[in-house]
C-alpha cells in the first residue's frame, strides 16, 4: 500500500504521476458524443475553489504526482482559470500543468495562461471543415479555435496537441484532410476512439469505429508507429517522412489498454475516481478545508488506491456510472 510521502502505486504495481482534475461540469459546447443537448444544471454549482484546488494538488504532489491536467466540462468557462493555473503551477513538485479545452476563448487568453505557468495544451478539434465542426459542436467557431491554436504554437509551451474523437462519418469522408493538416505543421493530432457512456448508447452504436481501422488506413499510406517511451501516454503515434506532424490513436477498447494506467482523476466536486469508467468515487472535499488535513488526505487517497480495478469493463459494454465525460472530466 502507498504511504504518504512515497510514490502512489496500486495493487497491480502501477505508479501514478498524473492527476486529471476537473474544475467544472459546465460546458458551452454541445458535442454530439458528449453533451448533445448542452450542459444541464444538476444540483449546486459549487465546484472546487482555488484554495481547495491548491491544497488538493499540494497533497497529491506529496504522493508523487508531477503533472496536473485541468479539464472539465470546459475548464475555461471558469473566470478564474488563469488564477487556477497559477495556483497549480506554484505547488512544489508540479512541473507540468496541462489544460484540455475546446478552444473557444484560446486566442484571447493563451498568452496569459502561459505566463501563469501553463506548460501543456490540448485543444479539441473534431473537424477541419467549418460546417462539420458546427454540426458536431453546435458552434460555428472553427476559425477562432484554429487561430488560438496557431497563437499557442508560437508560445513557449512544452507541447501543443489536438484531440479529435474518431467518428465513423469522419473516417468515411475525407480523412486525408487531417494528414494534409499535419504535412507542414509540427503538431500531434490524437484520435480518441469514441467511448460509450450512459448517455450516448445509440450514438456510440452508430459512430464507434475501432482505432485499428484508422491504424490500417495510415499504414497503407506509409505512416509508421513510433516506438513507445516508458512514460508515454496511451496514444500510439504514427509518423511519416513527408509530414512534419504526427497522428496518434488512443484506443481504450484495445486489449491491455489499462495495463499502463498512470493517472488518477478528481471531479469538480472533489471526488477521487479511480477509473473513468468505474462506479462511484471517494469523497475528498471534507479534507480540503485547511492545510492541516494534508496527511489525512494523502492517507485517504493511498487507502483508496488499493481498490483501483485492473481494468475498465467497456469491452463488456459496461461504462460504469458515468453519463458523459463532461461530468467527471474526460
Ligand atoms: N471541454 C474540453 C474539451 O472538449 O477539450 C475538456 C473536457 S472533454 C470531456 C475532454 C476530451 O474528452 C475531449 O477531447 C473530448 O473530445 C473527449 N470526449 C468526450 N466525450 C467522449 C467520448 N464519449 N468518447 C471519446 N472521447 C470523448
Ligand atoms: Fe463540452 Fe468538451 Fe464535452 Fe464537447 S467534449 S461537450 S467541449 S465537455
Image (cartoon, grey):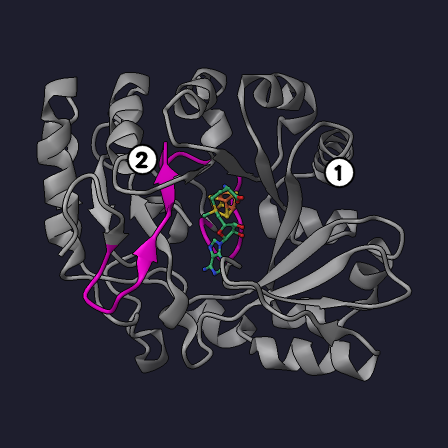
For residue 93, side relative to residue 289 (left or right):
right
| Mark 2 Cα shell of 10 Å, populated few (<14), some (14-19), many (≥20) | many
Residue 23 drawn above or below residue 244: above
Query: Closest to the observer: 116 or 282?
Result: 116
- Residue for badge 2: 61
Residue 123, compared with residue 193, is above or below; it is above
Residue in the foreground of this view, choosing between 35 and 271: 271
Q: Quadrant of residue 83?
A: top left
Kindly identify which residue carries mark 1: 146
| Residue 205 magenta-highlighted | no
The residue tagged with tag 2: helix, strand or loop? helix
Upstream in sequence: badge 2 or badge 1: 2
Distance, label 2 to label 1, CA atoms, is 33 Å
Query: Residue 330: image x %, image y %?
Result: 42, 50
Residue at image location 65% in from the left, 49% down from the top:
162
The kind of secondary structure the magenta stretch mainly shows is: loop
Using the image, determine if residue 275 lies above or below residue 267: below
Q: Ligand 1 closer than 8 Å to the CB at disc 2?
A: no
103 with respect to 52 (left or right): right
Q: Residue at x 89, y 51 (%)?
A: 184
Q: Residue visible at 28% across and 73% down?
A: 318
* Residue in front for this viewpoint, 19 or 3: 3
- Residue segment shown in magenta: 9-35
Amino acid at each position: 500500500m502507498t504511504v504518504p510521502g512515497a510514490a502512489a502505486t496500486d495493487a497491480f504495481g502501477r505508479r501514478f504521476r498524473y492527476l486529471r482534475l476537473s474544475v467544472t461540469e459546465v460546458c458551452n459546447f454541445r458535442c454530439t458524443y458528449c453533451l448533445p443537448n448542452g450542459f444541464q444544471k444538476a444540483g449546486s454549482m459549487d465546484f472546487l475553489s482555488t484554495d481547495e484546488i491548491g491544497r488538493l494538488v499540494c497533497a497529491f504532489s506529496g504522493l508523487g504526482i508531477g503533472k496536473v491536467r485541468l479539464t472539465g466540462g470546459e475548464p475555461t468557462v471558469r473566470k478564474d482559470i488563469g488564477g487556477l493555473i497559477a495556483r497549480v503551477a506554484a505547488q512544489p513538485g508540479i512541473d507540468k500543468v496541462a489544460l484540455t479545452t475546446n478552444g473557444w476563448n484560446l486566442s484571447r487568453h493563451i498568452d496569459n495562461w502561459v505566463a501563469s505557468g501553463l506548460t501543456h495544451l490540448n485543444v479539441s478539434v473534431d473537424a477541419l471543415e467549418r460546417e462539420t465542426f458546427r454540426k458536431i459542436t453546435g458552434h460555428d467557431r472553427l476559425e477562432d479555435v484554429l487561430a488560438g491554436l496557431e497563437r499557442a504554437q508560437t508560445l513557449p509551451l512544452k507541447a501543443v496537441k489536438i484531440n479529435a474523437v474518431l467518428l465513423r462519418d469522419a473516417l468515411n469522408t475525407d480523412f486525408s484532410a487531417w494528414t494534409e493538416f499535419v504535412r507542414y505543421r509540427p503538431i500531434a493530432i490524437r484520435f480518441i476512439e469514441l467511448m460509450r457512456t450512459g448517455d450516448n448508447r445509440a450514438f456510440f452504436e452508430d459512430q464507434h469505429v475501432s482505432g485499428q481501422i484508422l491504424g490500417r488506413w495510415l499504414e497503407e499510406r506509409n505512416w509508421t508507429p513510433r516506438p513507445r517511451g516508458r512514460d508515454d501516454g496511451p496514444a500510439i503515434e504514427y509518423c511519416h517522412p513527408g509530414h512534419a506532424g504526427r497522428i496518434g490513436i488512443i484506443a481504450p477498447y484495445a486489449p491491455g489498454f489499462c495495463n499502463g494506467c498512470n493517472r488518477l482523476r478528481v471531479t469538480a466536486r472533489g471526488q477521487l475516481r479511480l477509473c473513468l469508467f468505474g462506479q462511484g468515487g471517494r469523497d475528498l472535499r471534507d479534507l480540503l478545508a485547511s492545510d492541516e488535513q494534508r496527511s489525512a488526505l494523502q492517507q485517504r487517497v493511498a487507502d483508496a488506491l488499493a481498490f483501483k480495478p485492473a481494468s475498465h469493463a467497456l469491452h463488456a459494454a459496461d461504462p460504469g456510472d458515468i453519463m458523459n465525460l463532461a461530468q467527471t472530466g474526460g
